[in-house]
Amino acid sequence: MADLSLRDRIIQRLLAASDAKLTAADVDEATSLRQDLDISSLILITLASELEDELEIEIDDEELGRIQTIGDLFKAIEGKKRQNRQA
């Protein structure tokens, strides 16, 4: 799982980009990016690009398309970080 500070930062970014009236306390692993947070594909691509630069990872378009929930996003990030450590 993503470290707490990274997790909190990502959730805050998502909430800031969202029109949903949710707080960080309302968000969990099953929170849908599109349905619950109303995050558009463009916003998700922008966030992924920022995270790629910040964390020195690469999330390809196919993988990005499979990310549906916050949990999926954190799993993708952790997987990429793990791959970088092994390389």
Image (cartoon, rainbow, N blue to C red):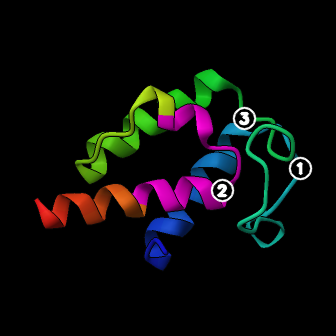
Query: Left or right: where does residue 32 sit relative to residue 71?
Result: right
Residue 28 image offset from top left, x and y in percent: 75, 68
- Residue 5 sits inside the magenta stretch: no
Q: Dots 3 and 1: beta carbons under 8 Å? A: no
> At 71% from the left edge and 66% from the top edge, which residue is drawn?
29
How far separated are the C-alphas under marks 1 and 2? Answer: 16 Å
Label 2 is placed on what type of residue? Ile
From which residue to which does the magenta span run? 63-77
Residue 83 image offset from top left, x and y in percent: 24, 59
- Residue 71 sits inside the magenta stretch: yes
> At 19% from the left edge and 58% from the top edge, which residue is drawn?
84
Q: Sequence order check: which comes first, mark 3 or mark 2? A: 3
How far separated are the C-alphas under marks 3 and 2? Answer: 11 Å
Closer to us: 87 or 51: 87
- Please tell me whether residue 38 is drawn above or below residue 9 in the rendered image: above
Read off the residue under disc 2: 70
Q: Sequence order check: which comes first, mark 3 or mark 1? A: 1
Q: Sequence order check: which comes first, mark 1 or mark 2? A: 1
How far separated are the C-alphas under marks 3 and 1? Answer: 13 Å
Query: Left or right: where does residue 74 sit relative to residue 51?
Result: right
Label annotation for residue 8 = none
Read off the residue under disc 3: 39
Q: Nearer the observer, disc 3 or disc 2?
A: 2
Q: Nearer the observer, disc 3 or disc 1?
A: 3
Crowding around mark 2 (Cα neighbors within 10 Å: few <14, some 14 to 19, many 20+) is many
Q: Which residue, as the protein is rendered here, is positioned at the far left?
A: 87
Label 1 is placed on what type of residue? Lys
Read off the residue under disc 1: 21
